[in-house]
Image (spheres, rainbow, N blue to C red):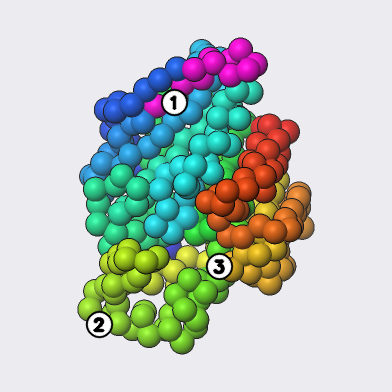
Amino acid sequence: MAKNKKRNALLLLGTAAAISATTYYYLTKAKSGEQIEEKDVVIKNTRGCDMPCKIVRPVTLKKVPLVVFCPGFNDDKTSEGRFLMIARNLAAKGVASVMMDHAGCGESSEDFTSYRLSNNIADIDTAFQYMLVEYNIDMDHLALVGYSMGGRDAVLFSRLRKEFHALVLLAPSLGRAYDGAAEELFGGVNSYKKLEESAKQNGYILFEDGPGNRIKVSEGFFEDMKEYDSLRALKDFTGHILYIQGAEDEVVPAEYSGKALQYLNKKAKLQYAYLDHVNHSFNVSEENSSQYERTVRLVADYLLAEL
């Protein structure tokens, strides 16, 4: 217990972000007339490495609500555009957003062996701290959005940063160790345990995350999966939650949402959305984008109501 407390304290105290170098920047106007800024920046993370981030915000000196987006396993900061569409809708209504590339993901120059829950949580805090330094953020109106493994990250982060009062969980992988659909990602419980043992012996495993995409998953990843219990963190959260589950999700099947919601705090205010004909990617890559756009509107409308 004392070890965990010490680690949590280090995560919170060690996240002062270096001022970033802007790599991309443009202004546009929303239909509402709000001027919107989109900016790609690079921030030094707690490991001393460059962390690419994207900021989407209304151009104003007034205090603005903030949404921090948490991408999934081996996912880029925009989550294949999911987050970016939501953030643009929010910015048009006066809400700022930030999203980041974790180690080995998207434009990150780090090796994927540094991808683990403890580092992800530190990355989220680094991006959050940067926004507090650079912009006029309304601390009374903060929300987290997490997709898949990023849902696990978001819930764990909410336990460290009690200021966040709203959570949006998109097909979240919640649990501890291989609970919460991690076994689906790694081919089942037995396969997960074999891979974990192999990582212990060799320091990492080579994992095929899609055709021709082999990544090094470290022993530390498996250690953190075992140590960090997102269901316990979910039980501690007493704010507002939007939990979205796709009926055709093949990675995080609906049965897992039922298990996770058993841990919900009685004080939490839950809105549960079960979407027909929606898979784990929320049909982001399919020609018919109606379900994807439906999800974007659902998330954006929920956050605008809660922030």
Q: Please state which of residues 47 and 94 is positioned toward the viewer in this rendering.
A: 94
Question: Label 3 amino acid?
Answer: Val
Q: Quadrant of the C terminus?
A: top right
Residue 111 locus on image (x, y percent): 24, 57
Question: Residue 46: where, in percent of width, then height?
Answer: 30, 46
Secondary structure at badge 2 equals helix
| Outermost residue, front side | 287
- 143 on left or right of 18: right
Reading the image, the residue beneath label 1 is 38
**In this view of the protein, can residue 79 be seen by the observer?**
yes
**Residue drawn at point x = 70 percent, y = 59 percent:** 277
Task: Report the residue marked by disc 2.
Answer: 201
144 horizontally vs 244: left or right: left
Is residue 122 in view from this perspective?
A: no
> In the displayed structure, would residue 93 be above or below residue 242?
above
Front-lying residue, 272 or 142: 272
Residue 251 is labelled as 3
